[in-house]
C-alpha cells in the first residue's frame, strides 16, 4: 500500500464512509496518517474509585455487582446502569441512549471501565467504555458526523499496517542526529498510538520540527524568488528633503528605518519589508517616506488600513504632508459620482498617494503606475495574505507595518519572507502611562475618577471584550450594556463604538470623540487602531484577563499621546492568580518588546501562530506552544539545508513539498 492510495483501499471503508472522511479532507492514506490526534486519554494505569476525582477521565478495575438495568425515562432518553465496586468503594456505570450495553457486562465479571467520573449525585462513570485489559493511551481525533473514534482509530491502524515502514523519510540522517529527532515512521506511528508520554513528546518534537522546517524553507524560497526591479529608483537626498516636510524631528530609529527602506528601493529586487515598532513610535512617518520615494520617481503609492476609521486618519495625514491635490481616498458609502471621480484620478495618475481599506487592491480600482504598497496593522494576517498583497500590487515594493512587537527570534521565523525593520525608540517628551490593576470593589471609585477627569476636559476610553453580554459568559461585560449603565450614571456625554455598527455610525462616533463632544467612549477593540485623540488620557479595560498582553498594550497605546499624564486601568474580574501574574508584566513595563517577550515566555509562540500563519499547521502551533527552542532549531536547519547541496539532495522529498506549497500558494493567489 502506498501513501498516495485512496482511503477506500482500506478494508471496511466503502463509498459512504469515504464520503464522511472526505468532510475532514481525508481522501488518501497520506491524509489519514497526517490527521493527528487533538488530545489523548491515558488509560495505561488503573485507579481506585476513591482516587478518581470529579471530572477526571480514569481507568477503573472493577467487579460488576449487578447485571445492567435499562430505564426508559422519557421518549428519546434511555438510561442503562450497572453497579460495580473495588476495594475502595462502589460506583454506578451509566450509559445514555445505549441500550445495547445491556449485553456488554454481566454480574460477577471483572472489567476495566474507562470514562469520565461524576461525583455530583453519588459516584458515577458516564458512558464508560468496557475493556477486558487496560487499553493504554488512546488517541482522540477531530471528527465529523458519520465518524466515530473507534472507526478513525481502526482506519489509522490499518493505514499504518498497510504502509509498514514504507513511509518515505524526509530528513537527512545527519540532521536527525544533530537535533535528536526520531525517524518519520516512528514519529507518525508514535503520534497515533503511543505507548508512553515520552513517545508522544518525541513524536511531537519530530513532526513539529519538520513542519516548521518546511514553513521556513517555503519562506526562504519566497525571498529568493522576489521579482527583479523593472527600473531603478533615484533616491539620493530624498530622506533629507522628506524630513523637511514633517512638522517634527524624526528619531534616530525612524531615520535608520528610512535608510533601510531607501536601500531596498535602490536595489535590484523589489522590497518586501516588515516595519514593526511600539505603539506611538512613529511608523506612519517612516511609511510616508516610502510613499514619498515612489512619488519622487513618478510612481504611485497606496497606503491600506484594516479599518475605515484608520484610513480616514491616514487621509488627513497624507493631505497635510503631500497636499490634497495629490491624494485620493476610497471608502465605503461614497456616492457613485464621488467614487468614480476618485477612481478616474487614480487611473490617470493625477493622484499619487492613495489610501483606503484593503479593498484598494480589489475590484474596480485601476492604478496608473503603482510603485509601492503599504499595509497597516497587517500583523493579523499570514504569509499567504502577505504574498497576495504583493501579487495584487503587480511589480510593486511592499512595506508591511505592525504595532504588535514580536520577539526577534519569533519574527525571524514567522516573517522569513520579509526583511525586518524595528523602531525601538519613542519620540522625546512622551510620558509613561500609569497602569494599575483595579479590584472589583474599587470599580465604582474608578468610574468616579473618570467622571471627574472628563468634567475637567479630559477624555476616556472604556473597552469591553464583547459587544453584548452572553448567558454563557455571565461575568463578561458587554459594551452595549455598559454604555447604557454609564449613560445613566455619569454626568458627562458617553458614546458607543463597536464593530457591528454601520460604517457611518462608527465614523460619527469616532469623530464626536475626536472633537471632544464625547467625554467617555465605550467601545470594543475596534478602537485598538485608528482612533488617535491626544486629549484622551484614560484607558479602562473591563475583563482585561480575556485579552492577550500584546492587545492590552496596543489598547494602552491609545492614551498618552499628548503631553498630559495618562492612565490605564485593568479590571481583571475573577481571572485567578495566573491572570494577575500576566497582567503584572503590563504594569511593570511600557515597552512593547519586553511585554512580547514576557507573553512568549508565559504562553509560548502559539499565541502568535494559530491560523494566522498559513503554511504552518495548527498541530505544529500547538506542539510548539511551549518550546521556542524547536522553532529556532528548525529555522537554523532550513538555513543549513539551503547552503548544502548534498543535504538538499538527501532532503529531496522535503524540498519538493516546500516547492509544492509555494506553487499552490501562488496558484491560489492568481485564481483570486
Image: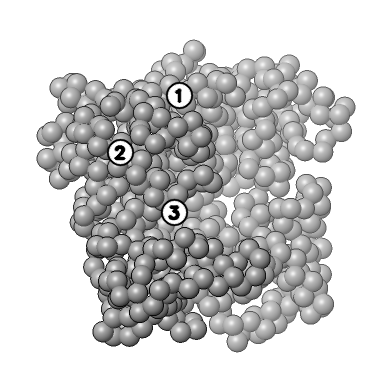
Q: Earlier in the sequence, mark 3 or mark 1?
A: 3
The quadrant where residue 474 appears: bottom right
Q: Earlier in the sequence, mark 1 or mark 2?
A: 2
**419 vs 54: above or below:** above
Label 2 or label 3, whichever lies nearer to me, is 2
Labelled pair 3, 1 in contact (Cβ < 8 Å): no
Mark 3: which secondary structure? helix
Say few, some or many: other residues with alpha carbon within 10 Å of mark 2 (under 14 / 14 to 19 / 20 or more): some
**295 vs 489: above or below:** above
Labelled pair 1, 2 in contact (Cβ < 8 Å): no
Residue occupied by mark 2: 158
Question: What residue is shown at x 31% (from left), y 62% (from top)?
Answer: 131
Residue 606 in sight from this viewpoint: yes
Mark 1: which secondary structure? helix
Nearer to me, 73 or 146: 73
Mark 2: which secondary structure? helix
Residue occupied by mark 1: 664
Residue 381 appears left or right of 269: right
Residue 561 appears left or right of 316: left
Residue 351 appears left or right of 120: right
Q: Position of residue 660 (x, y in %)?
A: 38, 23
Question: What residue is shown at x 29% (from left), y 54% (from top)?
Answer: 627
Q: Earlier in the sequence, mark 2 or mark 3?
A: 2
Nearer to me, 164 or 571: 164
Residue 425 in sight from this viewpoint: no
Quadrant (top left/top right/bottom left/bottom right) for the N terminus:
top left
Real-space CA distance between mark 1 and mark 2, rounded to the nearest whole angstrom = 30 Å
**469 vs 332: above or below:** below
Q: Position of residue 422 (x, y in %)?
A: 42, 45
Residue occupied by mark 3: 607
Amino acid at each position: 500500500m502506498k501513501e498516495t492510495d485512496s482511503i477506500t483501499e482500506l478494508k471496511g471503508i466503502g463509498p459512504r464512509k469515504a464520503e464522511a472522511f472526505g468532510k475532514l479532507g481525508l481522501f488518501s492514506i497520506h491524509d489519514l496518517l497526517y490527521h493527528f490526534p487533538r488530545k489523548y486519554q491515558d488509560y495505561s494505569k488503573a485507579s481506585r474509585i476513591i482516587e478518581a476525582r470529579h471530572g477526571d477521565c480514569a481507568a477503573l478495575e472493577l467487579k460488576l455487582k449487578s447485571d445492567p438495568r435499562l430505564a426508559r425515562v422519557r421518549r428519546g432518553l434511555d438510561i442503562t446502569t450497572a453497579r460495580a465496586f473495588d476495594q475502595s468503594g462502589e460506583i454506578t456505570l451509566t450509559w445514555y441512549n445505549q441500550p445495547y450495553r445491556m449485553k456488554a457486562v454481566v454480574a460477577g465479571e471483572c472489567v476495566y471501565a474507562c470514562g469520565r467520573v461524576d461525583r455530583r449525585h453519588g459516584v458515577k462513570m458516564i458512558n464508560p467504555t468496557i475493556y477486558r485489559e487496560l487499553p493504554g493511551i488512546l488517541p482522540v481525533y477531530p471528527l465529523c458526523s458519520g465518524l466515530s473514534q473507534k472507526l478513525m482509530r481502526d482506519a489509522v491502524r490499518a493505514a499504518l499496517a498497510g504502509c509498514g515502514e514504507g513511509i518515505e523519510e524526509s530528513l537527512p540522517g545527519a540532521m536527525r542526529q544533530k537535533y535528536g529527532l526520531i525517524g518519520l515512521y516512528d514519529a507518525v506511528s508514535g503520534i497515533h498510538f503511543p505507548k508512553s508520554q515520552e513517545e508522544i513528546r518525541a513524536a511531537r518534537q519530530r513532526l513539529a520540527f519538520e513542519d516548521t522546517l518546511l514553513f521556513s524553507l517555503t519562506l526562504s524560497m519566497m525571498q529568493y524568488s522576489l521579482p527583479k526591479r523593472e527600473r531603478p529608483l533615484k533616491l539620493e537626498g530624498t530622506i533629507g528633503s522628506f524630513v523637511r516636510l514633517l512638522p517634527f524631528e524624526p528619531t534616530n530609529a525612524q531615520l535608520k528605518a528610512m535608510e533601510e527602506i531607501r536601500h531596498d528601493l535602490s536595489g535590484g529586487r523589489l522590497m518586501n519589508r516588515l516595519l514593526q515598532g511600539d505603539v506611538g513610535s512613529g511608523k506612519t512617518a517612516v511609511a510616508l517616506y516610502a510613499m514619498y520615494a515612489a512619488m519622487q520617481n513618478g510612481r504611485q503609492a497606496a497606503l491600506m488600513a484594516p479599518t475605515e476609521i484608520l484610513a480616514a486618519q491616514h487621509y488627513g495625514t497624507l493631505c497635510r504632508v503631500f497636499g490634497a491635490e495629490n491624494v485620493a481616498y476610497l471608502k465605503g458609502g461614497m456616492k457613485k459620482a464621488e467614487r468614480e471621480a476618485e477612481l478616474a484620478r487614480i487611473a490617470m495618475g493625477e493622484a499619487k498617494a492613495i489610501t483606503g481599506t484593503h479593498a484598494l487592491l480589489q475590484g474596480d480600482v485601476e492604478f496608473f503606475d503603482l510603485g509601492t504598497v503599504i499595509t497597516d496593522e497587517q500583523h493579523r494576517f499570514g504569509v499567504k495574505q502577505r504574498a497576495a498583497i504583493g501579487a495584487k500590487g503587480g511589480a510593486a515594493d511592499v512595506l508591511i507595518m505592525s504595532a504588535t512587537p514580536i520577539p526577534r527570534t519569533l519574527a525571524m521565523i514567522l516573517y522569513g519572507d520579509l526583511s525586518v525593520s524595528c523602531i525601538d525608540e519613542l519620540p522625546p517628551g512622551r510620558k509613561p502611562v500609569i497602569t494599575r490593576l483595579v479590584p472589583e470593589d474599587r470599580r465604582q471609585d474608578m468610574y468616579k475618577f473618570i467622571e471627574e477627569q472628563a468634567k475637567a476636559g479630559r477624555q476616556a476610553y472604556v473597552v469591553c471584550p464583547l459587544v453584548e453580554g452572553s448567558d454563557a459568559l455571565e461575568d463578561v461585560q458587554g459594551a452595549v450594556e455598559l454604555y447604557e449603565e454609564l449613560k445613566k450614571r455619569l454626568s458627562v456625554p458617553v458614546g458607543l463604538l463597536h464593530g457591528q455598527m454601520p460604517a457611518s455610525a462608527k465614523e460619527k462616533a469616532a469623530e464626536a470623540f475626536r472633537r471632544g463632544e464625547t467625554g467617555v467612549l465605550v467601545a470594543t477593540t475596534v478602537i485598538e487602531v485608528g482612533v488617535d485623540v491626544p486629549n484622551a488620557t484614560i484607558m479602562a479595560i473591563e475583563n482585561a484577563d480575556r485579552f492577550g498582553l500584546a492587545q492590552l498594550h496596543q489598547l494602552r497605546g491609545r492614551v498618552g499621546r499628548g503631553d498630559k499624564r495618562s492612565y490605564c486601568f485593568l479590571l481583571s474580574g475573577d481571572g485567578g492568580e495566573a491572570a494577575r501574574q500576566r497582567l503584572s508584566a503590563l504594569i511593570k513595563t511600557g515597552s512593547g518588546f519586553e511585554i512580547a517577550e514576557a507573553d512568549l515566555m508565559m504562553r509560548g509562540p502559539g499565541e502568535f501562530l494559530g491560523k494566522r500563519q498559513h503554511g504552518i499547521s495548527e498541530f505544529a502551533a500547538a506542539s510548539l506552544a511551549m518550546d521556542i527552542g524547536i522553532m529556532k532549531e528548525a529555522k537554523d536547519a532550513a538555513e543549513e539545508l539551503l547552503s548544502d547541496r548534498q543535504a538538499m539532495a538527501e532532503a529531496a522529498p522535503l524540498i519538493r513539498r516546500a516547492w509544492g506549497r509555494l506553487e499552490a500558494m501562488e496558484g491560489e493567489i492568481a485564481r483570486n
